[in-house]
Image (cartoon, rainbow, N blue to C red):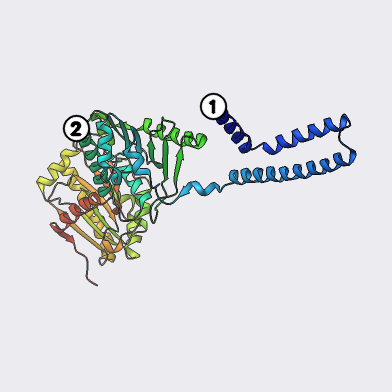
Amino acid sequence: MKHPNLAIRLATRVLEDEYLDLYVLAVTALAFTILGAIGVASITALASMILALLTFLAISQIRSRRQIASIANAQQADPLSLLAADFPADLIKRRAAANDLLLIGMTMSRTVQGSSREDMRQTLLRGGRIRVLLADPTDDVLLAQVVSRHGGNLNAQRLRARIQSTIDELTSLQVGANGKLEIRVAASVPTMGVNAVDSGESQGVLVVQHYQHRPLVEASPIIRLEAKDASWYGHFLAEAERMWQDGRAWPLSPAQALARIPRPAFVESFGTSLEHDMSGASELLITGVARNTLLMSNYNRFEAWLRRGCQIRFLLVNPSSDYALSCAAERYYAKRSPDTLRERINQSLRLLEELGNSNRNALSVRLTAHPLPLGIVAVDSTPALRSEASAIFAEYYTYQAPGEPKFVLQPADGRWYDTILGEAEALWNGSTEYLPKMSN
C-alpha cells in the first residue's frame, strides 16, 4: 500500500517543480536526438519536433522573464515606505510580551504613566529587564534646551514635573518585582525616541522616533525595524546603546546632584559692555555707595545721555548717616574711613549737581541710610521699555575681601531679575530726595 502513495507524492513533486518545463524540454530533445542519430526518425519528423521544442523554449523564456521582473519589482520597493507618521499598531502588544525593553525619550510619560504601565509591571514580575533613559530633571540648562526644541506651551517647570512623575511611577513598579529595572538620565538632549523590544533576539523590534524641532503634531518620521533589517537595525540599536551608556544612573549621587545645580557667572569687570549698553538706553537706574569712579570716568557721556533725553536716577548712600557710612567703610578690603567715604560721596553729589543744572528734567538723585551690599546699573528696566538690550549690571560689595564679584541679569532670567530690580526700586522708594527731577 505504500508504493502507490510514494508514486503519487513523486508525481506531485514533479508536476509542482518550477523547473518542470526545462526537464521536459531536455528529455524530449535528448530522445529525438538519439532517434535521429540511429535513423529511426525521419528528417520531416525531426524538423517538426525541433519547431515544437523551439516553441516550448520560447514559452519557458517568457515565464522566466516574468519571474525575474517580479523579483526586480520587489527589490525596487519604495524606500520611504519605512517612514511613518504614527507608531506601529502592534507596538503596545510587542512591549507587553517583551522580556527586555530599552526605552529612550524626553519624558516617556505616555508610555510609563499610560496604558503600558501594567504591562511593564508584568514584565518585571516575570523576571524581565527594563531600561529607561530620560532627560535629566535636575539640569536646568538641559530642560531649557528641551523646551526650545519642543515648542508649544511647555515650560521647564512642567517638563521637570513630567519627568519626575515618570521616575516616581517607574520606582513604584519595582516594588515586589523579580526583574531588573534601571533608570538613567541624559546629560544632553536625546536625538531620538527609542522603543527597543527584545533587541537581542532574532524576533527583535526597534521603533525609532525622530525628534523634530518644534513639531506641530507628533514628532516624525517614525521608523519600525526588525532584526532581519540587519544593517539599519544594527545602526540605530548601536546608537541607542551609546546613548544609554552615556546616561547617569538615577538617583544621582550627591556629587552629581551638586554638579547639576546652575552657578552664577561672575566676572571681574563688565568691560565695554556696560558703557555700550548705557549709551543706547532710554532709562537708567544706578545705585551704589558713592559711584565716584563711574561718574568721573563717564562724566561727558552722562552729560550727552541726559541731553538726548535719557532718564537717569542715582541712588547713593546718605553721607549724613554715620551708621550707613561706618558699615560701608568696613566692607572695603583696603581700609577706608567713614570720613574718606563721606568725601567721595559728596564729590559725586557735586558732579551730579553740575549735571542737573541744565538737565534737571532728566536727572534725579536720592540718598539712602541703608548700607547697600549691592550696587546696580539697570538699563531700560521699566516694563514698557524692556528689550533684548535691557539688563542689570550688578556688583556685590564683599566684606573685607579682595575683589567685587560682578554679574549680569536680563528680563529672560525671570524671578532673579525681578528680585534684584525689586530691591533697588524698594530702596529708591524709601529714600530721601537730594536732587529732585523738575516737572516738564
Residue 263 seen from this side = no
| Amino acid type for the residue under numbered disc 1 | Lys
Q: What element carries label 2?
A: loop
| Amino acid type for the residue under numbered disc 2 | Val
- Residue neighbourhood size for the residue with mark 2, other residues' Cα within 10 Å, grouped as few (<14), some (14–19), many (≥20): few
Q: Is residue 11 left or right of residue 230?
A: right
- Image quadrant holding the C terminus, namely bottom left
- Judging depth in this view, the residue of 430 and 294 nearest the camera is 430
Number of the front mark, 1 or 2: 1
Residue 419 seen from this side = yes
Q: What element carries label 1?
A: helix
Above or below for 8 versus 339: above
**Does the residue at mark 1 contact the one at mark 2 (Cβ under 8 Å)?**
no
Above or below for 406 versus 249: below
Residue 244: give x, y in percent of width and height. 37, 33
- Judging depth in this view, the residue of 29 and 100 nearest the camera is 29
Q: Is residue 134 left or right of residue 203?
A: left
Of the two numbered discs 1 and 2 on the same chain, state the one appearing first in sequence. 1
Which quadrant of the structure image shows residue 426?
Answer: bottom left
Question: What label sits on residue 175 in the rendered view?
Answer: 2
Residue 262: give x, y in percent of width and height. 28, 39
Residue 364: give x, y in percent of width and height. 22, 61
Q: Is residue 58 left or right of residue 363?
A: right
Furthest residue in direction bottom, as rendered: 440
- Residue neighbourhood size for the residue with mark 1, other residues' Cα within 10 Å, grouped as few (<14), some (14–19), many (≥20): few
Residue 200: give x, y in percent of width and height. 41, 30
Q: Residue, x 38% and y 55% (percent of image)?
A: 217
- Judging depth in this view, the residue of 198 and 284 nearest the camera is 198
- Judging depth in this view, the residue of 280 and 340 nearest the camera is 280
Q: Name the residue under label 1.
A: 2
Q: How far apart are marks 1 and 2 (CA)?
A: 63 Å
